[in-house]
Image (cartoon, rainbow, N blue to C red):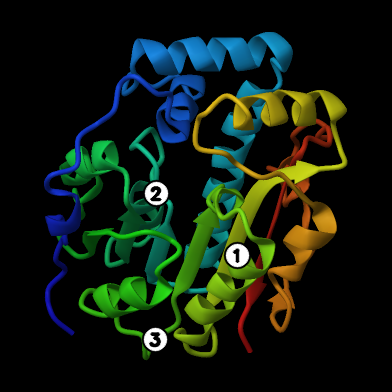
Amino acid sequence: MTDPVTTPEPAKHQKIDTSVPHSARIWNYWLGGKDNYPVDEEAGDAYTAVFPGIVTIARCSRAFLRRNITYLVSEAGIRQFLDIGTGLPTAQNTHEVAQGLAPETRIVYVDNDPMVLAHARTLLYSSHEGATAYIDANVTDPDRIIAAAAEALDFGRPTALILSNILGHVADYDQARSIVTRLMDALPSGSYLSINDGSRGIDPVFEQAQDAYNNSGAVPYILRTVDEITTYFDGLELLEPGVVSVTQWRPEPGSPTPEVIAEHGGLARKA
């Protein structure tokens, strides 16, 4: 296994288009981040005017991911993560949570957004014992991701694959499923799959806001039913409580009874 490397070349000449809102920058805005432009703030504000609950979804999604990572490191003993669709760095990134619990953990981030690439140095900050790497690639090219990630991760060891709010950007559902299958096929027994995405059939107001956003000319994000999200885990051992609203996935002890929101996810193990 070689030392981790970044692969920035494909995006080297890409420019950040500040005239069109971008989902990663809008998400960053909803999370309270500063890495966005007026066009993103305008789109984010227009969205929250229709559906204020999107801010709750964004923050609960991040909390779900944090609880997943905590389980994977502390209980499942995972020390390698492949995080695809990284998004812009905010608080409690995958490497911060994982290496805070086990400093020797290795993380590979994958994204194809030139603004994320500009922040790769932040993502690559690592503990001395562990390592992080960044790959410039699209989720629709799993073979490239696997080949590049193998330079930093040992695919002979269990690895956690994270697909957080990224599969909705793959318009064709069958293609999204095939991407998940191809990526998991490359990982050994004992690996894990963590997925969470916006869900359809829970909140009509959310669906109205998302459909309007998709028709605005911005990069669309497709909401999928809970059954469709659950099918991503076919052939794997779903951990309890299964695919549920992210607020209901192993909430912190003593926390209030969580409300159901239109963001569902789960965690599963490859036998």
- Give the quadrant of residue 200: top right
Residue holding disc 3: 157
Q: Earlier in the sequence, mark 1 or mark 2?
A: 2
Q: Are marks 3 and 1 in contact (CB under 8 Å)?
A: no
Is residue 100 in sight in this rendering?
yes
* Mark 3 and mark 2: Cα distance apart in space: 22 Å
Residue holding disc 2: 86
- Amino acid at circle 1: Ala
- Amino acid at circle 3: Arg
- Amino acid at circle 2: Thr
* Mark 1 and mark 2: Cα distance apart in space: 17 Å
Decide: is 29 above or below 154. Answer: above
Residue shown at the point (31%, 60%) measured from the top left? 137
Residue shown at the point (54%, 90%) measured from the top left? 189
Residue 163 as seen in the image, left or right of residue 119 = right
Query: Element type at marker 1?
Result: helix
Q: Nearer the viewer, residue 50 or 129?
A: 50
- Residue 165 appears at what percent x and percent y? 56, 47
Decide: is 141 above or below 234. Answer: above
Residue holding disc 1: 176
Q: Which image quadrant: the N terminus?
A: bottom left
- Residue 257 appears at what percent x and percent y? 84, 34
Query: Element type at marker 2?
Result: loop
Q: Nearer the viewer, mark 3 or mark 2?
A: 2
Residue shown at the point (53%, 51%) measured from the top left? 166
* Dot 1 alpha-carbon crowd within 10 angstroms: few under 14, some 14 to 19, many 20 or more: some
